[in-house]
Image: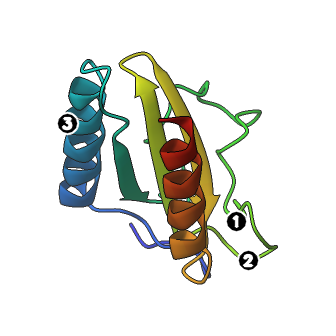
Amino acid sequence: MSAPEGNSMTSPLDTFLSDQALAAARDAATDPSLIPVAVTAANGEQCTWCDCPDGPDSPHNRRDYRCDGCPEKAESVVSLFAGPYLRYDYPACERHRMDILAAVAQFVGGQR
């Protein structure tokens, strides 16, 4: 199966590694002294990094998922865990990924 033009599909290994990163961050979030962050690839097809409903009305099930900082296509997702069951996801293009990470670090540092 080939990916539609302008869209990259993730391999089973990519999905496995993303799931492992999210699970490790979620597990680390059980320690109240930690606020773990995971950076995973944006699938570009169907969301694998949150519990959004599957189907055509899913907010993440579209090929044109965009960065939170600009209209560019999201290449990754920065996931901030504020507890094992509380996660905030920020889609990011390559140019804004570090900006989002820096903003998260600054916010978390100010909250401590």
Q: Which SS class for mark 1?
A: loop
**Nearer-N-terminus badge (3/1):** 3
Q: Does residue 84 appear left or right of residue 16 in this picture?
A: right
**Proximity of marks 1 and 2: CB atoms separated by less than 8 Å:** yes
The N terminus appears in which quarter of the rendering?
A: bottom left
Q: Of marks 1 and 2, which one's residue comes earlier in the chain? A: 1
Q: Label 1 amino acid?
A: Cys
> Which residue is depicted at the point 19% across and 42% down?
20
Task: Name the residue tied to disc 3.
Answer: 24
Indicate whether 12 appears above or below 63: above
In percent of width and height, residue 92 lies at: 60, 66
Q: Which mark is residue 67?
A: 1
Q: Judging from the image, what secondary structure is the residue with disc 3 in? A: helix
Residue at image mark 2: 72
Amino acid type, label 3: Ala
Q: Earlier in the sequence, mark 3 or mark 2?
A: 3
| Nearer to us in this view, 112 or 91 | 112
- Distance (Cα) linking label 3 and label 2: 29 Å
Left or right, 2 with respect to 26, comes to: right
What is the C-alpha distance between the residues marked 1 and 2?
6 Å
Q: In this view, does 27 lie above or below 46?
A: above
Q: How far apart are labels 3 and 1 at the CA level?
A: 24 Å
Q: Nearer the viewer, residue 50 or 10?
A: 50
Residue 109 seen from this side? yes
In contact (CB < 8 Å): disc 3 and disc 1:
no
Residue at image point 22% right, 25% down = 27
User: Residue 49: x percent and y percent?
Assistant: 44, 41
* Amino acid type, mark 2: Glu
